[in-house]
Amino acid sequence: MNKPLYRTKAHKSNMIKLLILGIIVLLASVAYILINSYLPNMKIFMYVLKIRIPTLIVMLIAAIAIGGASIIFQSIINNRIVTPCLLGMNSMYTLVHTAVVFIAGSTSILATNANLAFGVDLIVMGVVATFIYSYMFKKTGNNVLYVLLIGTVLSSFFGSIQSTMIRVMDPNEYDALLTTLVANFNNVNAEIIIFSVVLLVALTIFLWKELKLLDVITLGKDQAINLGVDYDRVVRKLMLGVVLCIAVATAMVGPISFLGLIIANLARQLLKTYKHTHLIIGSALMGMLAIIGGQVISEHVFSFAVPISTFITIGGGIYFLYLLLSKKGI
């Protein structure tokens, strides 16, 4: 007897929504590549493709990493108005870049070489975050809320150190630093794309068993344990995955604080399901659409004068207030 393709009407509806969302993302991607691409002039068109295709791939990778990490993080914390940036990764990123310019200078190889800068960001953020949160999980008895509080304190701590460095930094050095502290999809280094994809694929394989248990984890610790789940181990590995995903995305494009909050909640509102396979895919697709749309506005409306992070921060702040006032995020 053939197994039915759709288990319920809700499952079928969500699959159709994801398909439509995927088609919209595909159309947005094509539009991003073709807008003002001087298609009749093949030489200029090929030059435009050489620039925009790597940028598009980086946007898609960042959306997948942030979208997936945000859904997982919210499910672990069991709160829809939290975002992985509360773990302090954005503050750590700005601190690393500020420290490099402060110590080595804006003309040093650590600041000017894109591959080396990406490697430094990823190694420092990955190693420090892994050590801190693994240690904190053990010391707090795997209490997620304590770890979240520690992440908030660390964000303030990293921000204070960075502010102190900026106060005594040469103004010319600060001008050179400022452009690296905001999310930027311009002049993308194509060499880091393969490395980032390999990292995310390896991380997915490493966490695959834990990802399949997310539906059970959201029932609560006691219920998950009663159903045979090693709750503490699963949550610890998932939190490590969240930290590393955000580290990869932030090292690639810079901090985008509110993006995870926006796309995760939009996916939940659109799909209205507990199944995390659908939610993660929906969140990633929402992220792709948001980043591509924001980049099109940044490039073709404001001529690169306003970074994409500005639109996301403004939109995210408004959406955050909406969630609080409507009580949909609690």
Image (cartoon, rainbow, N blue to C red):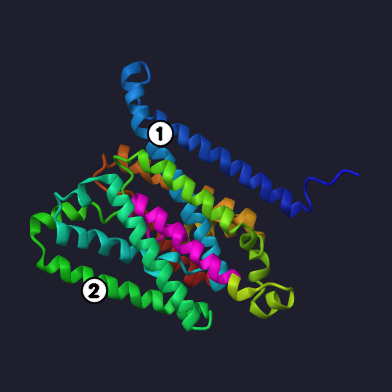
Is residue 54 shown above or below 79? above
The disc labelled 1 sits on which kind of residue? Ile
* Dots 1, 2 in contact, CB < 8 A: no
Q: Position of residue 80 (x, y in %)?
A: 53, 68
Residue 253 drawn in magenta: yes
Q: Quadrant of residue 88?
A: bottom left
Identify the mark at residue 274; answer none if there is no mark. Answer: none
Q: Residue at x 57, y 51 (%)?
A: 282
Q: Is residue 127 visible?
A: yes
Give how far apart the Cα atoms at labels 1 and 2 are: 38 Å
Residue 70 drawn in magenta: no
Quadrant in the picture for the N terminus = top right
In the image: residue 129, left or right of residue 216: left
Q: Position of residue 52 (x, y in %)?
A: 37, 34
Under tag 1, what secondary structure? helix
Sequence-wise first label, 1 or 2: 1
Q: Residue at x 48, y 72 (%)?
A: 325
Which residue is tagged 1? Answer: 53
Under tag 2, what secondary structure? helix
Which residue is tagged 2? Answer: 160
* Residues shaded magenta: 234-260
Q: Position of residue 181 (x, y in %)?
A: 26, 56
Q: Is residue 287 visible?
A: no
